[in-house]
Image (cartoon, rainbow, N blue to C red):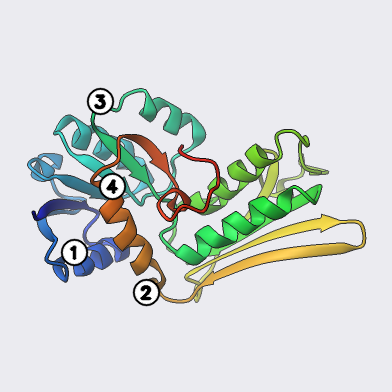
Amino acid sequence: MTTRVAIVGASGKMGRLFSRLLEASPDYEVHASLTSRSDLTEMDGADLVVDVSTPAISAEVVAHALAAGANVLVGTSGWSREKLDALERTIPTGRGVLIIPNFSVGSALGTALSILASKFYESIEIIESHASTKIDSPSGTAVRTAELIDRARAELGPVEAPHVDQRARGELIAGIPVHSLRQRGIVAQQRVILGGPGETLTIAHDTIDQSAYEHGITLALARAQHVTGLVVGLENVIDLGLGGQA
């Protein structure tokens, strides 16, 4: 059976990538392609809505899609812990939302390794870099990494983060300083730097081309159709054992 998919943010880089992958698969039909000028009702009738719009309208897109009876796959940044908690309370019975901050399998593996290593180091900071066109910071990937590290270290206590009152120390996410760079020539990079007595460990991931997202998108599309409730993170699609949902 063919799945009808509506893409919100279809004119952006990720939207065009989704369109290409969907059109190449016999399992999917592009039901509607919405841009910033489209009325959200254009998505009505889709089995699945893909939201790769902007943080400013993402919550509205998700709410409309759920009300229209569709599951939602979100690839838009800006979903804080508070917004996720609020969303989870409003998802109708039998419907689901899958939120993927980063569709790269390598990025998910980098996060998994960072969580494992975080239990052995007390000093942890994150540096994330993206193209100058990315309008939000910190990235959703960095926020997710920091939150999962904090969760994994719950019994160990907070990481060392001195001088956090200084603006140059970055934004504090779940007690972890996160530094954001926005520059030309970069697709996406993340460095998790862990420090202990006499050593540091850096877990780095570099995205050099959008083709890095294709495998994760394919896996997420298949999972999003059947999800119920709220699921956050590609790690829960490829089963890296990082502790379940949201």
Residue 142 image offset from top left, x and y in percent: 56, 52
Q: Earlier in the sequence, mark 1 or mark 4?
A: 1
In the displayed structure image, the side of residue 152 where residue 244 appears, left or right: left
User: Dot 4 lies on which element?
Assistant: helix
Say whether residue 155 is visible.
yes
Q: Identify residue for label 1.
A: 22
User: Dot 3 lies on which element?
Assistant: loop
| C-alpha separation, residue under disc 1 versus residue under disc 4 | 14 Å
Q: Earlier in the sequence, mark 1 or mark 3?
A: 1
Q: Identify residue for label 3.
A: 92
Residue 210 image offset from top left, x and y in percent: 38, 72
Circles 1, 4 touching at the beta carbon (< 8 Å): no
| C-alpha separation, residue under disc 1 versus residue under disc 2 | 14 Å
Q: Earlier in the sequence, mark 3 or mark 4?
A: 3
Residue type, numbered disc 1: Leu
Mark on residue 211? 2
Q: Earlier in the sequence, mark 2 or mark 3?
A: 3
Q: Identify residue for label 4.
A: 224
